[in-house]
């Protein structure tokens, strides 16, 4: 293929939670600065095209088909069998080269060191955070997971380190020294989100980078965690450009950010919020947003579906809302789906009212039936659930 991943500079992003939002924020800031950039994210919610985008426009069907057909021909010629994710990653790198992007913002699929995306050499490596997730693959401790994620730090790169646990941060700093990174920017020391407060339609915060401070920046996303992502995104963009972004560019960039499936409001009366939280840390962030950003809702109706590798009890505990009235369990559209009755059983053991539904559409329909105009329906537990719900809700508006 001619190593298309080396034909443009790359910002590489890893972390347990917040990778997708951070990728979108950096892409938006680059576009506001006039940099034509591609972005590669995973997973998709509704259509596979979402994973590959240039200037926030997903790849068209014809272009995607052409990329995959070329890869299929190459695969047959080389007599190799690539994984599904490897083929999509190769398609992204190849398409970005064909379209002559000026930069690519690449989200790691899993881990970092041995992820397919790591054939690229990021001039900036952004780490959002490190929590326990995918332990069966990455290791059963935060230290082991950090060691895998640190593999995206490359010689001469700038590491933007969002994880501020000293013992975990030290693993990334050691990797940076070993490979000869140019610099390490640390959350709290070099960049931060300060004076964070709730605003209509999102949050407002002061964003601090090594070069300057931006006051009262509006982030049109719900949850205080998105301001932390915004600070890392701004630092990563500044590190990439090697210059300070103007105040107008920063505000324009964040104003246009959208994060589908991340505390996304898709309907009102009743309020329906979609969030792809599928681990304890993600569910805790969603729970905090329920308490802070959506405190006006009378009751919360929860639609939840999980994969077999997830612990629904951990998710329910992390959400921890005293307004949680009903849990409607469903099965994600995946062969790895956890049976809905398992969620009902766990919810019942926690003293919650729960009922089993068929698929995601049935569960969302049931939630809308029992929710009042001043209630909130939260769809969560898996991005597979969120994607199915999102498509259905759009079809009935």
Image (cartoon, grey):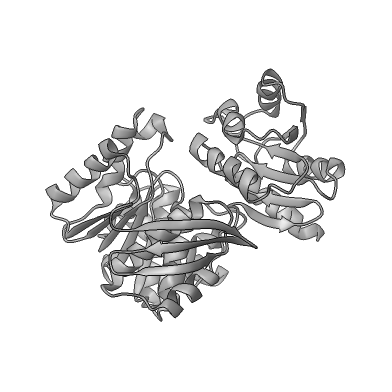
Image coords of residue 331 (percent x, y): 68, 35
Q: Quadrant of the N terminus?
A: bottom left
Q: Nearer the viewer, residue 336 or 312?
A: 312
Looking at the image, is 44 positioned above or below residue 381? Answer: below
304 vs 158, left or right, is right
Count of numbered labels shown in the rendering: 0
Q: Nearer the viewer, residue 357 or 60?
A: 357
Picture residue at 32% right of the left edge, 39% below the top: 165
111 vs 174, left or right, is right
Report which quarter residue 106 is drawn in.
bottom left
Looking at the image, is 261 positioned above or below residue 5? Answer: above
Picture residue at 58% right of the left edge, 52% below the top: 262
Looking at the image, is 7 positioned above or below residue 356? Answer: below
Image coords of residue 393 (percent x, y): 75, 55
Picture residue at 65% right of the left edge, 36% below the top: 305
Q: Nearer the viewer, residue 384 or 4?
A: 384
48 vs 142, left or right, is right
Image coords of residue 380 (percent x, y): 63, 42
Looking at the image, is 243 positioned above or below residue 340? Answer: below
Picture residue at 20% right of the left edge, 46% below the top: 173
Report which quarter residue 40 is drawn in.
bottom left
Task: Answer whether residue 131 is visible to the viewer in this image.
Answer: yes
Image coords of residue 272 (percent x, y): 73, 51
Q: Quadrant of the C terminus?
A: bottom right
Toward the front, the furthest residue is 195
Report which quarter residue 132 is drawn in.
top left
115 vs 24, left or right, is left
Task: Answer whether residue 4 is visible to the viewer in this image.
Answer: no
């Amino acid at each position: 293929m001619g190593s298309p991943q080396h034909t443009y500079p790359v910002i590489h992003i890893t972390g347990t939670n917040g990778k997708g939002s951070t990728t979108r924020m950096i892409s938006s800031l680059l576009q506001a600065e006039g940099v034509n950039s591609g972005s590669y994210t995973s997973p998709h919610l509704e259509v596979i095209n979402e994973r590959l985008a240039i200037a926030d426009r997903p790849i068209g069907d014809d272009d995607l088909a052409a990329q995959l057909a070329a890869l299929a021909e190459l695969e047959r010629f080389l007599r190799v069998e690539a994984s599904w994710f490897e083929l999509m990653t190769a398609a992204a790198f190849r398409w970005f080269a064909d379209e002559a992007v000026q930069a690519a913002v690449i989200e790691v699929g899993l881990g970092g060191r041995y992820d397919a995306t790591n054939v690229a050499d990021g001039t900036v490596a952004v780490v959002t955070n490190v929590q326990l997730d995918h332990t069966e693959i990455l290791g059963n401790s935060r230290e082991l997971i950090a060691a895998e994620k640190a593999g995206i730090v490359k010689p001469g790169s700038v590491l933007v380190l969002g994880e501020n646990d000293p013992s975990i941060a030290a693993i990334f700093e050691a990797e940076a020294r070993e490979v000869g990174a140019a610099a390490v920017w640390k959350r709290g020391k070099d960049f931060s989100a300060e004076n964070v407060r709730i605003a209509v339609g999102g949050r407002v915060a002061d964003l601090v980078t090594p070069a300057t401070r931006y006051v009262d920046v509006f982030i049109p996303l719900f949850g205080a965690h998105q301001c932390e992502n915004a600070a890392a995104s701004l630092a990563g963009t500044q590190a990439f450009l090697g210059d300070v972004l103007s105040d107008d560019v920063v505000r324009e960039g964040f104003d246009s950010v959208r994060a589908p499936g991340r505390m996304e409001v898709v309907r009102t009366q009743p309020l329906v919020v979609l969030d792809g939280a599928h681990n304890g840390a993600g569910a805790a962030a969603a729970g905090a947003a329920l308490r802070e950003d959506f405190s006006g809702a009378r009751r919360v109706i929860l639609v939840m579906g999980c994969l077999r590798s997830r612990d629904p009890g951990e998710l329910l505990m992390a959400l921890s809302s005293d307004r949680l009235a009903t849990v409607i369990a469903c099965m994600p559209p995946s062969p790895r789906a956890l049976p809905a009755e398992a969620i009902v059983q766990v919810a019942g053991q926690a003293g919650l009212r729960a009922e089993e539904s068929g698929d995601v559409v049935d569960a969302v329909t049931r939630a809308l039936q029992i929710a009042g105009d001043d209630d909130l329906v939260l769809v969560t537990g898996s991005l597979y659930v969120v994607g199915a719900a999102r498509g259905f809700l759009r079809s009935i508006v």
